[in-house]
Amino acid sequence: MNTGPARIEINEVGPRDGLQIEKAQVPTDDKVAFVDALSDCGFARIEVTSFTSPKAIPALADAQEVMRRIRRRGGVVYTALVPNIRGLERALEVGVDELNLVMSSSETHNRANLRMTREQSLAELGAVLQAAQAAGVPSNVSLSTAFGCPFDGDVPADQVLRLAHQLAEAGAAGITLCDTTGMAYPTQVAALCERMARELPAMPLTVHLHNTRGMALANAVAAWQTGVTRYDAAAGGLGGCPYAPGASGNVNTEELVHMFECMGVQTGVALQPLLAIVRGLPGLVRRELTNPLLAAGHRLATHAPPAWLAERFGPA
Ligand code: COA
Ligand code: ZN
């Protein structure tokens, strides 16, 4: 098996991608406590919230208050999603370390999610990139539906690369390829990541995977084998875009960390404090969450043998 980088970075997006789709209105205090707990786990970045229209994403209408109140731990980059100039203004008022701008690779999802054509989004993000640069804040750009669109179907790689080149020229400090509704499969992920590395070698690349069809971890390994070092993930596998039919959770952060840890890849993230947070998530979002890793524990969390073994075979 081809091995990838010895060390990777994980961006926790649960407070943003995770909470944006939850039916329960999570109180601001609980959001702040969630982010503060995540700050002690070793993430490279935490995407705290989104500065979107409160009509579009009512669950994150308290973005400014959350951003103002979180405890900012040194070494963690606190980011927020921004779709337009109004969002940038709100983000700058409260201070973010980095912006995560967003548009879609496919036309129909861009219209449904952002109420703009891709041309309009490119113009809007161009203005945001300029203004953010003037304010001294770096901007990553997330390209939604990069591996497939729930409306338009397959998204040609050429289309994704064209947008990535345009955004690079406009001043993006990084690009994230997002698998918004879990349509990506491993060979496709590897091919697109390799093309990005070939055509935009200096551009930091992140992959943002959803586990809608059970392929997220396989896709993460495929990206890793091509050299990708940055991964978005959501604690407890929360997440999903409310404007993408059939959307469901991001790749579970704890499963991603556990898997890479087993493979000897350093993630910087401490699994035990993360699992303690995951245990509290059903209380936060007020619904049951199935979590095989939480149920089974670490792969080396072994069990005491049955008592009769010692009687029959003597001490081991
Ligand atoms: N923050 C707060 N309010 C905003 C805003 C922002 N970033 N952008 C627009 N608004 C407000 C406007 O002030 C206006 O308010 P009013 O009705 O009180 O006058 C209203 O929203 C409509 O503004 P408009 O520019 O016409 O926006 P729109 O309705 O066309 O929506 C977006 C465009 C991009 C703002 C909206 O679709 C959006 O926020 N989408 C985000 C979707 C998302 O986050 N999806 C999941 C992540 S991929
Ligand atoms: Zn997502």
Image (cartoon, rainbow, N blue to C red):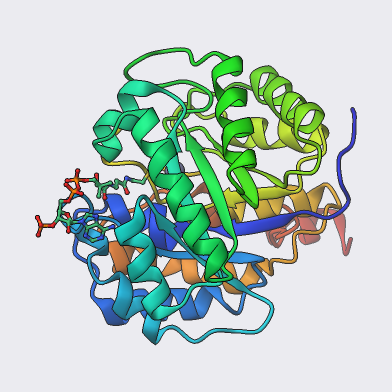
Instruction: Give me the residue at 83% from left, 52% from top.
Output: 265
Instruction: Give me the residue at 88% from left, 64% from top.
Output: 315
Quarter the N terminus occupies? top right
Measured from the top left, where is residue 271 in percent x and y? 66, 66
Q: Is residue 126 above or below residue 308?
A: above
- 226 left or right, relative to 270: right
Quarter the C terminus occupies? bottom right
- Of the pair 48 and 30, the residue shown nearer to us: 48
Measured from the top left, where is residue 122 in percent x and y? 44, 37
Picture quadrant where residue 197 is located: top right
Measured from the top left, where is residue 141 in percent x and y? 54, 46
Regarding residue 286, the answer to whether it shows in the image is no
- Quadrant for ligand 2 reads top left
- 23 left or right, relative to 138: left
Picture quadrant where residue 7 is located: bottom right
Instruction: Give me the residue at 60% from left, 17% from top.
Output: 157
Regarding residue 44, the answer to whether it shows in the image is yes
- Counting every numbered tag in the picture gives 0
Q: Is residue 100 above or below residue 29?
A: above
Q: Is residue 140 above or below residue 31?
A: above
Measured from the top left, where is residue 107 in percent x and y? 36, 22
Picture quadrant where residue 20 is located: bottom left
- Of the pair 264 and 172, the residue shown nearer to us: 172
